[in-house]
Amino acid sequence: MRAVCFVIVLACACASTGNMTPCSGGDVCVAPGDPVAVDAAGIRIAPGALHVELVNVPEDSRCAIGVQCVWAGRARVRLRVDSASERRVLDLRTDSTTATVFAHTITLDSLLPYPRANQPIEQSQYRAWIHITPN
């Protein structure tokens, strides 16, 4: 089932295969192939000033649940951000979470699912929760 995300004044939820995962206020859930439109204030609308899409997760070395690790690891998400006239691709990491593009700050709040031992994650399963604020 294609992930559908809704933002409601102070809360949002991302539905994927029937599971509801709460987000903190103001966050937007992005998924592969499902761009999100936001207005100049960073609030999700359609159409919007920006379109943000999770392209992929090129790195996920986070320590899997059920495994003891020396290093916590990190993940890197690649986002495509389109304005009315330009396109930018940016990478955000779970250990360095903020970037500025088109007069907006985009912060990576979380990336799910979290790795589990011996359970590979397909790119289509990833969901990135981001917070977008105008500068």
Image (spheres, rainbow, N blue to C red):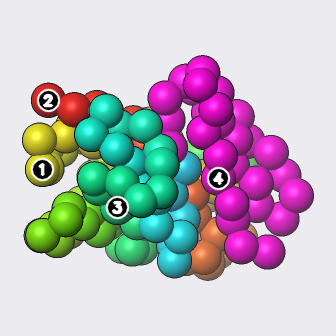
Secondary structure found at label 1: loop
Q: Quadrant of the C terminus?
A: top left
Secondary structure found at label 2: loop
- Against 85, residue 110 (above or below) is above
At label 3, the amino acid type is: His
At label 2, the amino acid type is: Asn
Secondary structure found at label 3: strand
Alpha carbons under labels 1 and 2: distance apart: 9 Å
Q: Depth check: give the residue in front, 2 or 45.
A: 45
Residue that badge 1 annotates: 102
Residue that badge 4 annotates: 5
Magenta region, mostly helix, strand or loop?
A: strand
Q: Which mark is residue 135?
A: 2
Residue at the image point whose x is 51% and y is 77% from the top = 33
Alpha carbons under labels 4 and 2: distance apart: 24 Å
The stretch of residues the image draws in magenta is: 1-28
Q: Depth check: give the residue in front, 103 or 68.
A: 103
Residue that badge 3 annotates: 51
